[in-house]
Image (cartoon, helix red, strand yellow):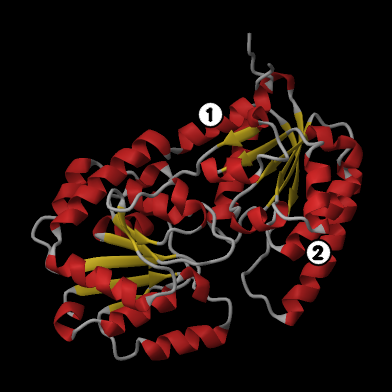
Amino acid sequence: MNEREGILNKKIFFIGTLPPPIDGQSKIASIVLETMYENNADVMVLNLNRARISRTFTDQIRRFFGILLIYSKVILSQKNVDSIYFTISESKLGNVKDLILYLLIYKRLKLLTIHMLGGANMDKILNNNSLLSMLNVFFMKKMRNVIVEGARGQQIFAKTFTKNNIHITPNFADEFLFSSKEICLEKYENIEKIKLLYLSNMIPEKGYLTLVKAIQLLPSKIMSQFEITFVGGFQHQKHQKEFNECIRNMPMIKYLGPFIDGEKKKSLYLSSHIFCLPTYYPYEGQPVSILEAYATGCAVITTEHGGILDIFKDNINGFTVKANSPAALSSCMRSIATDRQKLKYFALRNIEDAITMYTKHRFKSQISDIFFLTH
Protein backbone atom coordinates (compact mmCIF):
# COMPACT_ATOMS: atom_id res chain seq x y z
CA MET A 1 0.00 0.00 0.00
CA ASN A 2 1.29 3.46 -0.91
CA GLU A 3 2.03 5.83 1.97
CA ARG A 4 3.07 9.45 2.20
CA GLU A 5 6.63 9.97 3.38
CA GLY A 6 6.35 13.72 4.05
CA ILE A 7 5.87 13.25 7.80
CA LEU A 8 9.31 11.65 7.93
CA ASN A 9 10.92 14.98 6.95
CA LYS A 10 12.24 13.63 3.71
CA LYS A 11 15.43 15.46 2.71
CA ILE A 12 15.33 16.98 -0.77
CA PHE A 13 17.95 19.02 -2.61
CA PHE A 14 15.99 21.46 -4.81
CA ILE A 15 17.87 22.98 -7.77
CA GLY A 16 15.58 25.22 -9.79
CA THR A 17 14.76 28.62 -11.22
CA LEU A 18 12.72 30.67 -8.74
CA PRO A 19 11.30 34.23 -8.94
CA PRO A 20 12.21 36.95 -9.57
CA PRO A 21 11.49 37.47 -12.36
CA ILE A 22 8.09 35.80 -12.44
CA ASP A 23 7.61 33.84 -15.63
CA GLY A 24 6.12 30.47 -16.49
CA GLN A 25 9.22 28.50 -15.54
CA SER A 26 9.89 30.25 -12.22
CA LYS A 27 6.22 30.06 -11.25
CA ILE A 28 6.07 26.29 -11.87
CA ALA A 29 9.31 25.68 -9.96
CA SER A 30 8.11 27.77 -7.00
CA ILE A 31 4.96 25.67 -6.71
CA VAL A 32 7.03 22.47 -6.81
CA LEU A 33 9.03 23.87 -3.89
CA GLU A 34 5.84 24.92 -2.08
CA THR A 35 4.49 21.38 -2.49
CA MET A 36 7.65 19.94 -0.94
CA TYR A 37 7.28 22.19 2.11
CA GLU A 38 3.60 21.27 2.44
CA ASN A 39 4.68 17.61 2.64
CA ASN A 40 6.98 18.46 5.56
CA ALA A 41 10.13 17.89 3.55
CA ASP A 42 13.48 19.18 4.74
CA VAL A 43 14.50 21.11 1.60
CA MET A 44 17.87 22.60 0.70
CA VAL A 45 17.31 25.19 -2.03
CA LEU A 46 19.70 26.23 -4.77
CA ASN A 47 18.10 29.01 -6.81
CA LEU A 48 19.22 29.19 -10.46
CA ASN A 49 17.30 32.37 -11.21
CA ARG A 50 18.48 34.97 -13.67
CA ALA A 51 17.54 38.32 -12.14
CA ARG A 52 16.58 39.79 -15.50
CA ILE A 53 16.03 38.63 -19.05
CA SER A 54 18.71 40.92 -20.51
CA ARG A 55 21.61 39.07 -22.16
CA THR A 56 24.27 41.80 -22.42
CA PHE A 57 27.98 40.93 -22.23
CA THR A 58 28.12 42.17 -18.61
CA ASP A 59 25.13 40.01 -17.70
CA GLN A 60 26.76 36.96 -19.27
CA ILE A 61 30.02 37.52 -17.32
CA ARG A 62 28.02 37.89 -14.13
CA ARG A 63 26.13 34.72 -15.02
CA PHE A 64 29.40 32.82 -15.59
CA PHE A 65 30.66 33.55 -12.10
CA GLY A 66 27.21 32.75 -10.73
CA ILE A 67 27.41 29.31 -12.36
CA LEU A 68 30.78 28.62 -10.72
CA LEU A 69 29.19 29.44 -7.36
CA ILE A 70 26.28 27.10 -8.17
CA TYR A 71 28.67 24.23 -8.89
CA SER A 72 30.47 24.76 -5.59
CA LYS A 73 27.14 24.69 -3.74
CA VAL A 74 26.14 21.50 -5.56
CA ILE A 75 29.32 19.79 -4.38
CA LEU A 76 28.69 20.85 -0.76
CA SER A 77 24.92 20.26 -0.59
CA GLN A 78 24.32 16.91 -2.32
CA LYS A 79 25.22 14.70 0.63
CA ASN A 80 22.71 13.01 2.92
CA VAL A 81 19.62 13.65 0.82
CA ASP A 82 16.79 11.33 -0.20
CA SER A 83 15.93 13.06 -3.47
CA ILE A 84 17.31 15.70 -5.81
CA TYR A 85 15.07 17.88 -7.99
CA PHE A 86 16.48 19.83 -10.93
CA THR A 87 14.89 22.01 -13.63
CA ILE A 88 16.98 21.36 -16.72
CA SER A 89 17.91 23.60 -19.65
CA GLU A 90 17.35 22.84 -23.33
CA SER A 91 19.75 25.21 -25.04
CA LYS A 92 23.04 23.60 -26.08
CA LEU A 93 25.09 25.82 -23.78
CA GLY A 94 22.62 25.27 -20.94
CA ASN A 95 22.73 21.55 -21.53
CA VAL A 96 26.54 21.52 -21.28
CA LYS A 97 26.20 23.26 -17.90
CA ASP A 98 23.68 20.58 -16.88
CA LEU A 99 26.06 17.81 -17.92
CA ILE A 100 28.72 19.24 -15.61
CA LEU A 101 26.19 19.20 -12.78
CA TYR A 102 25.35 15.56 -13.55
CA LEU A 103 29.05 14.76 -13.32
CA LEU A 104 29.32 16.51 -9.95
CA ILE A 105 26.49 14.40 -8.51
CA TYR A 106 27.34 11.26 -10.47
CA LYS A 107 27.20 8.95 -7.44
CA ARG A 108 23.72 10.26 -6.58
CA LEU A 109 22.13 10.27 -10.03
CA LYS A 110 19.79 7.51 -8.89
CA LEU A 111 18.22 10.10 -6.56
CA LEU A 112 17.73 12.70 -9.29
CA THR A 113 14.38 13.75 -10.78
CA ILE A 114 14.74 16.22 -13.63
CA HIS A 115 11.92 18.54 -14.71
CA MET A 116 11.68 19.52 -18.37
CA LEU A 117 9.83 22.83 -18.70
CA GLY A 118 9.82 23.09 -22.45
CA GLY A 119 11.41 20.42 -24.59
CA ALA A 120 11.37 21.45 -28.24
CA ASN A 121 15.13 21.85 -28.38
CA MET A 122 15.80 18.95 -25.98
CA ASP A 123 14.31 16.68 -28.63
CA LYS A 124 17.05 17.84 -31.02
CA ILE A 125 19.75 17.35 -28.38
CA LEU A 126 18.69 13.85 -27.34
CA ASN A 127 17.59 12.27 -30.56
CA ASN A 128 20.63 12.46 -32.81
CA ASN A 129 24.04 10.79 -32.94
CA SER A 130 26.10 13.66 -31.52
CA LEU A 131 28.47 13.46 -28.55
CA LEU A 132 26.07 15.73 -26.64
CA SER A 133 23.26 13.26 -27.21
CA MET A 134 25.35 10.26 -26.09
CA LEU A 135 26.45 12.04 -22.90
CA ASN A 136 22.87 12.96 -22.01
CA VAL A 137 21.66 9.41 -22.60
CA PHE A 138 24.53 8.03 -20.49
CA PHE A 139 23.64 10.20 -17.50
CA MET A 140 19.84 10.07 -17.85
CA LYS A 141 19.72 6.28 -17.87
CA LYS A 142 21.04 6.43 -14.31
CA MET A 143 18.43 8.93 -13.05
CA ARG A 144 15.27 8.24 -11.07
CA ASN A 145 12.56 10.19 -12.95
CA VAL A 146 11.80 12.88 -15.47
CA ILE A 147 8.79 15.20 -15.19
CA VAL A 148 7.38 16.47 -18.49
CA GLU A 149 4.48 18.75 -19.36
CA GLY A 150 2.69 16.52 -21.86
CA ALA A 151 2.72 13.51 -24.17
CA ARG A 152 5.24 15.20 -26.45
CA GLY A 153 7.74 15.18 -23.58
CA GLN A 154 7.13 11.48 -23.05
CA GLN A 155 8.21 10.86 -26.64
CA ILE A 156 11.33 13.00 -26.24
CA PHE A 157 12.62 10.94 -23.29
CA ALA A 158 11.41 7.54 -24.52
CA LYS A 159 14.90 6.15 -25.07
CA THR A 160 16.40 7.45 -21.81
CA PHE A 161 13.68 6.62 -19.24
CA THR A 162 11.22 3.78 -18.85
CA LYS A 163 7.54 4.67 -19.25
CA ASN A 164 6.96 4.32 -15.50
CA ASN A 165 9.66 6.88 -14.79
CA ILE A 166 8.29 9.54 -17.15
CA HIS A 167 5.68 11.59 -15.29
CA ILE A 168 3.31 13.76 -17.32
CA THR A 169 2.42 16.76 -15.15
CA PRO A 170 0.71 19.60 -17.03
CA ASN A 171 1.17 23.19 -15.90
CA PHE A 172 -1.61 25.20 -14.25
CA ALA A 173 -3.35 28.53 -13.86
CA ASP A 174 -3.58 30.23 -10.45
CA GLU A 175 -6.86 29.68 -8.59
CA PHE A 176 -7.73 33.37 -8.36
CA LEU A 177 -7.88 33.64 -12.16
CA PHE A 178 -10.63 31.08 -12.68
CA SER A 179 -13.85 32.53 -14.05
CA SER A 180 -17.33 31.07 -14.31
CA LYS A 181 -19.17 30.29 -17.52
CA GLU A 182 -21.80 32.87 -16.55
CA ILE A 183 -19.22 35.67 -16.29
CA CYS A 184 -17.60 34.45 -19.49
CA LEU A 185 -20.86 34.68 -21.43
CA GLU A 186 -21.41 38.27 -20.29
CA LYS A 187 -18.30 39.61 -22.00
CA TYR A 188 -19.26 38.05 -25.34
CA GLU A 189 -22.66 39.74 -25.42
CA ASN A 190 -22.87 42.87 -27.55
CA ILE A 191 -19.12 43.16 -28.25
CA GLU A 192 -18.30 46.73 -29.24
CA LYS A 193 -14.56 46.23 -29.67
CA ILE A 194 -12.82 42.87 -29.92
CA LYS A 195 -10.23 43.02 -27.14
CA LEU A 196 -7.08 41.06 -27.88
CA LEU A 197 -4.31 40.47 -25.32
CA TYR A 198 -0.64 39.57 -25.74
CA LEU A 199 0.97 38.75 -22.36
CA SER A 200 4.46 37.24 -22.53
CA ASN A 201 8.09 38.27 -22.72
CA MET A 202 8.63 40.77 -25.52
CA ILE A 203 11.06 38.54 -27.38
CA PRO A 204 10.73 38.67 -31.20
CA GLU A 205 10.37 34.87 -31.43
CA LYS A 206 7.43 35.00 -29.03
CA GLY A 207 5.58 36.74 -31.85
CA TYR A 208 4.85 40.26 -30.63
CA LEU A 209 6.29 41.78 -33.82
CA THR A 210 4.28 39.29 -35.89
CA LEU A 211 1.14 40.57 -34.18
CA VAL A 212 2.01 44.24 -34.76
CA LYS A 213 2.72 43.57 -38.45
CA ALA A 214 -0.53 41.59 -38.74
CA ILE A 215 -2.49 44.56 -37.37
CA GLN A 216 -0.79 46.85 -39.88
CA LEU A 217 -2.00 44.58 -42.70
CA LEU A 218 -5.65 44.93 -41.65
CA PRO A 219 -7.95 47.22 -43.65
CA SER A 220 -8.78 50.29 -41.59
CA LYS A 221 -12.42 49.21 -41.28
CA ILE A 222 -11.36 45.89 -39.69
CA MET A 223 -8.54 47.44 -37.65
CA SER A 224 -10.99 49.81 -35.97
CA GLN A 225 -12.91 46.83 -34.55
CA PHE A 226 -9.98 45.74 -32.36
CA GLU A 227 -8.31 46.93 -29.16
CA ILE A 228 -4.93 45.27 -28.59
CA THR A 229 -3.02 45.24 -25.30
CA PHE A 230 0.61 44.16 -24.83
CA VAL A 231 2.23 43.22 -21.51
CA GLY A 232 5.78 41.92 -21.19
CA GLY A 233 9.41 42.77 -20.57
CA PHE A 234 11.95 43.48 -23.31
CA GLN A 235 15.41 41.89 -23.49
CA HIS A 236 16.98 45.04 -24.90
CA GLN A 237 16.10 48.69 -24.45
CA LYS A 238 16.50 49.32 -28.18
CA HIS A 239 13.75 46.79 -28.89
CA GLN A 240 11.39 48.68 -26.60
CA LYS A 241 12.20 51.97 -28.31
CA GLU A 242 11.58 50.39 -31.73
CA PHE A 243 8.28 48.94 -30.51
CA ASN A 244 7.11 52.25 -29.05
CA GLU A 245 7.96 54.01 -32.29
CA CYS A 246 6.16 51.35 -34.31
CA ILE A 247 2.88 51.70 -32.38
CA ARG A 248 3.08 55.49 -31.94
CA ASN A 249 0.43 56.12 -34.61
CA MET A 250 -1.67 53.07 -33.78
CA PRO A 251 -4.19 54.23 -31.13
CA MET A 252 -5.84 50.81 -30.93
CA ILE A 253 -2.66 49.41 -29.33
CA LYS A 254 -1.71 49.84 -25.66
CA TYR A 255 1.48 48.72 -23.91
CA LEU A 256 0.95 48.35 -20.14
CA GLY A 257 4.55 47.64 -19.17
CA PRO A 258 6.78 44.68 -18.34
CA PHE A 259 4.69 43.00 -15.68
CA ILE A 260 1.19 42.72 -14.25
CA ASP A 261 -0.18 40.43 -11.55
CA GLY A 262 -2.94 39.93 -9.00
CA GLU A 263 -6.35 41.48 -9.53
CA LYS A 264 -5.06 43.78 -12.29
CA LYS A 265 -3.95 40.74 -14.25
CA LYS A 266 -7.25 38.97 -13.65
CA SER A 267 -9.22 42.04 -14.70
CA LEU A 268 -7.17 42.33 -17.89
CA TYR A 269 -7.77 38.69 -18.84
CA LEU A 270 -11.47 38.87 -17.92
CA SER A 271 -11.98 41.93 -20.11
CA SER A 272 -10.19 40.31 -23.08
CA HIS A 273 -11.98 38.22 -25.69
CA ILE A 274 -8.86 36.76 -27.32
CA PHE A 275 -5.44 35.83 -26.01
CA CYS A 276 -2.80 35.81 -28.76
CA LEU A 277 0.61 34.13 -28.55
CA PRO A 278 1.93 33.61 -32.10
CA THR A 279 5.16 32.08 -30.85
CA TYR A 280 8.00 30.39 -32.67
CA TYR A 281 10.38 30.64 -29.71
CA PRO A 282 12.86 27.73 -29.99
CA TYR A 283 12.56 26.80 -26.29
CA GLU A 284 8.78 27.10 -26.05
CA GLY A 285 7.22 24.78 -23.53
CA GLN A 286 3.64 24.69 -22.32
CA PRO A 287 2.83 28.40 -21.86
CA VAL A 288 1.22 29.18 -18.52
CA SER A 289 -0.22 32.30 -20.16
CA ILE A 290 -2.39 30.14 -22.44
CA LEU A 291 -3.71 28.20 -19.44
CA GLU A 292 -4.44 31.50 -17.69
CA ALA A 293 -6.38 32.58 -20.77
CA TYR A 294 -8.37 29.34 -20.57
CA ALA A 295 -9.19 29.90 -16.90
CA THR A 296 -10.45 33.44 -17.56
CA GLY A 297 -12.61 32.53 -20.52
CA CYS A 298 -10.59 33.77 -23.49
CA ALA A 299 -10.46 32.31 -26.96
CA VAL A 300 -6.85 31.72 -28.06
CA ILE A 301 -4.86 32.38 -31.20
CA THR A 302 -1.51 30.59 -31.25
CA THR A 303 0.84 28.38 -33.27
CA GLU A 304 1.42 24.63 -33.48
CA HIS A 305 4.75 24.93 -31.73
CA GLY A 306 6.55 23.38 -28.75
CA GLY A 307 4.40 22.24 -25.84
CA ILE A 308 1.34 24.09 -27.16
CA LEU A 309 0.45 20.95 -29.10
CA ASP A 310 -0.25 19.16 -25.78
CA ILE A 311 -2.84 21.68 -24.58
CA PHE A 312 -4.38 23.24 -27.68
CA LYS A 313 -6.58 21.99 -30.52
CA ASP A 314 -7.39 24.10 -33.56
CA ASN A 315 -11.05 25.09 -33.84
CA ILE A 316 -11.71 23.73 -30.35
CA ASN A 317 -9.69 26.06 -28.12
CA GLY A 318 -9.29 28.76 -30.74
CA PHE A 319 -7.33 29.25 -33.95
CA THR A 320 -3.84 28.17 -34.97
CA VAL A 321 -1.88 30.32 -37.37
CA LYS A 322 1.34 29.74 -39.26
CA ALA A 323 4.37 30.75 -37.19
CA ASN A 324 6.15 34.01 -38.07
CA SER A 325 3.49 34.89 -40.63
CA PRO A 326 1.86 38.31 -40.22
CA ALA A 327 -0.30 37.55 -43.26
CA ALA A 328 -1.73 34.38 -41.70
CA LEU A 329 -2.43 36.13 -38.40
CA SER A 330 -3.99 39.11 -40.15
CA SER A 331 -6.25 36.78 -42.14
CA CYS A 332 -7.33 35.09 -38.91
CA MET A 333 -8.20 38.47 -37.36
CA ARG A 334 -10.24 39.43 -40.42
CA SER A 335 -12.23 36.19 -40.12
CA ILE A 336 -12.91 36.84 -36.44
CA ALA A 337 -14.15 40.36 -37.18
CA THR A 338 -16.77 39.00 -39.59
CA ASP A 339 -17.82 36.06 -37.36
CA ARG A 340 -17.46 36.78 -33.64
CA GLN A 341 -19.80 34.05 -32.40
CA LYS A 342 -17.15 31.34 -32.46
CA LEU A 343 -15.15 33.15 -29.78
CA LYS A 344 -17.79 32.44 -27.14
CA TYR A 345 -17.79 28.71 -27.80
CA PHE A 346 -13.99 28.52 -27.65
CA ALA A 347 -13.99 30.45 -24.37
CA LEU A 348 -16.56 28.18 -22.71
CA ARG A 349 -14.60 25.09 -23.78
CA ASN A 350 -11.40 26.63 -22.43
CA ILE A 351 -12.89 27.28 -18.99
CA GLU A 352 -14.01 23.65 -18.90
CA ASP A 353 -10.53 22.42 -19.87
CA ALA A 354 -8.89 24.63 -17.23
CA ILE A 355 -11.16 23.36 -14.45
CA THR A 356 -10.70 19.74 -15.49
CA MET A 357 -6.98 19.61 -16.26
CA TYR A 358 -5.04 22.75 -15.36
CA THR A 359 -5.54 23.55 -11.68
CA LYS A 360 -2.80 24.13 -9.12
CA HIS A 361 -4.39 21.51 -6.85
CA ARG A 362 -4.05 18.85 -9.55
CA PHE A 363 -0.45 19.87 -10.24
CA LYS A 364 0.50 19.72 -6.55
CA SER A 365 -1.14 16.33 -6.15
CA GLN A 366 0.89 14.92 -9.05
CA ILE A 367 4.16 16.37 -7.69
CA SER A 368 3.36 14.93 -4.26
CA ASP A 369 2.81 11.50 -5.79
CA ILE A 370 6.22 11.63 -7.49
CA PHE A 371 8.22 12.62 -4.40
CA PHE A 372 6.22 11.42 -1.41
CA LEU A 373 4.70 8.07 -2.29
CA THR A 374 6.53 4.82 -1.62
CA HIS A 375 5.79 2.00 -4.02
Depth check, mark 1 against mark 2: the one in front is: 1
Give the mark nearer the N terminus: 1 vs 2.
2
Residue 273 percent across, percent down from the top left:
24, 60
> Is residue 150 something that shows in the picture?
no
Label for residue 66? 2
Above or below, 20 relative to 366:
below
Mark 2 closeness class: few <14, some 14–19, many ≥20 residues within 10 Å? some
Above or below, 356 relative to 3:
below
Label for residue 133? none
Quadrant in the picture for residue 217? bottom left
Residue appearing at x 15%, y 61% in the figure: 340
Amino acid carrying label 1: it is: Ser
Quarter containing the N terminus: top right
Q: Nearer the viewer, residue 231 or 130?
A: 130
> Relative to 43, is 360 on the left or the right?
left
Label for residue 365? 1
Amino acid carrying label 2: it is: Gly
Q: What separation in Å lies between label 1 and label 2 (alpha carbons)?
A: 33 Å
Residue 33 percent across, percent down from the top left:
64, 40
Residue 190 percent across, percent down from the top left:
8, 60
> Relative to 172, is 353 on the left or the right?
left
In what element is the residue under mark 2? helix
> Is residue 145 something that shows in the picture?
yes
Callout 1 touching callout 2 (CB < 8 Å): no
Residue appearing at x 55%, y 58% in the figure: 22
In what element is the residue under mark 1? helix
Q: Nearer the viewer, residue 131 or 267?
A: 131
